[in-house]
Image: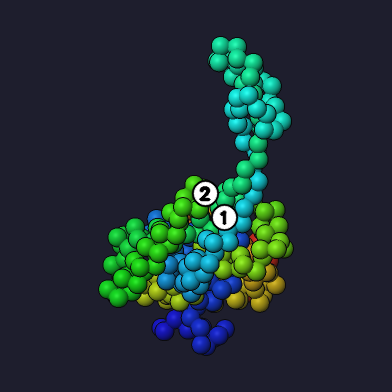
Amino acid sequence: MDGVTGTDPMTSATAQLWRRRDRRIPAVAAASAMTGLPPAVLREAARISLAASVEAEALLATMGERVRSLPLELADTLERCVNSVRGPVVWSETITARANALGNDDVFVCTTARRTFDCPANRMLVAVLTEIAASTRALRGPVGTFLSPDDAARIEQVAARARLWRHHDRLDGVPARAPRVREQARMRHGRHAEALKPVFDARRRVMQPFEEPDIEGLCDPMTATLHIGVLEVFDEAVRRLGIDPVITFADGALRTGPLAFRHPRSAGSAPPGLSIAGEPVRDDQDLWRMLEAGELVSAARAHPR
């Protein structure tokens, strides 16, 4: 078998299954269920894929201008003032400070505003740079051994550039943190939206690190052949039962309606291989008899979309 199905003669079954998944599924978990590789190995592969991506290169190419125009925010901070008041007085802190100053009544603790680079946009940028820089460690792992010396050297250079920018004076004290949903919405529609596009593109690649060729490359021949049968079964169930073709994820398995697939080498509570409503499929004949007899209809109703 060559890994090509009748659904799209130019695309492998592995690629079609990956393309059909719900993008809200964590990429590493879905890839483990498909390929049988451990999550730790796939996280290394994800970092290497990120460092080799056009999104990472596009972001790093903008960093020189970006660090000169990083967004700033005003943050309140407590400041101990002597013989002066530089903002609203925080009396609880002032009383404590005066007690520690042997009753000096000229000590005040005030709230003052200061400019800081610690804001959602810069935290997102630092988080992406940290992920790209982490590809150096991934190169030392099992996945790195499959790269050519030239590819490994190129990724090492990308990681080094990301590490350098991550520790730039203006970013060194900014924590790596993904933005909240509201913060993302505010940034996408704010005045810095256009400038932040390369950062958002790179973060999207962090969340979805594997393209179809990446997943194909992570599969051995046995797994690629296994995917042919899985895609055929999923397609037939969609056609006969009218269930949603989008592949979801639960219990360590990829799912379409009552059908589930978990690679035998991956972890999860779902039965390994193909299963129907939690029951393992013994062989192809058993599966097709159930489809012909309509026994899957009741299972589909018991497991709605």
Closer to us: 208 or 172? 172
Residue 141 visible in the displayed image = yes
Horizontal arrangement in the rendering, residue 42 relative to residue 284 (left or right): left
Q: Residues within 10 Å of mark 1 (few under 14, many from 20)?
A: many
Q: Amino acid at mark 2?
A: Val
User: Disc 1 or 2, which lies upstream in sequence?
Assistant: 1
Q: Amino acid at mark 1?
A: Asn
Q: Determine whether label 1 and label 2 are within 8 Å by CB.
A: yes
Residue 94 vertical position relative to residue 186 in the rendered view, above or below: above
Give residue 89's position: percent from left, percent from top.
70, 27
Q: Nearer the viewer, residue 282 or 177?
A: 177
> Is there any visible trace of residue 262 in the rendered image?
no
Q: Quadrant of the C terminus?
A: bottom right
The residue positioned 65% from the left and 46% from the top of the image is 74
| Element type where label 1 sits in the image | helix
Q: Which mark is residue 122?
A: 1
Front residue (pair 287, 220): 220
Q: What residue lies at 48% left-to-right and 84% top-to-bottom? A: 4
Instruction: Name above or below for residue 238 compared with residue 299.
Output: below
What is the crowding at mark 2: few (fewer than 14 residues within 10 Å), some, or many (at least 20)?
many
Q: Which residue is mark 2?
A: 174
Which residue appears at 53% of the width and 67% of the height? 65
Residue furthest front as drawn: 83
Q: In this picture, is 295 found above or below 114?
A: below
Q: Quadrant of residue 142?
A: bottom left
Q: Residue furthest top?
A: 102
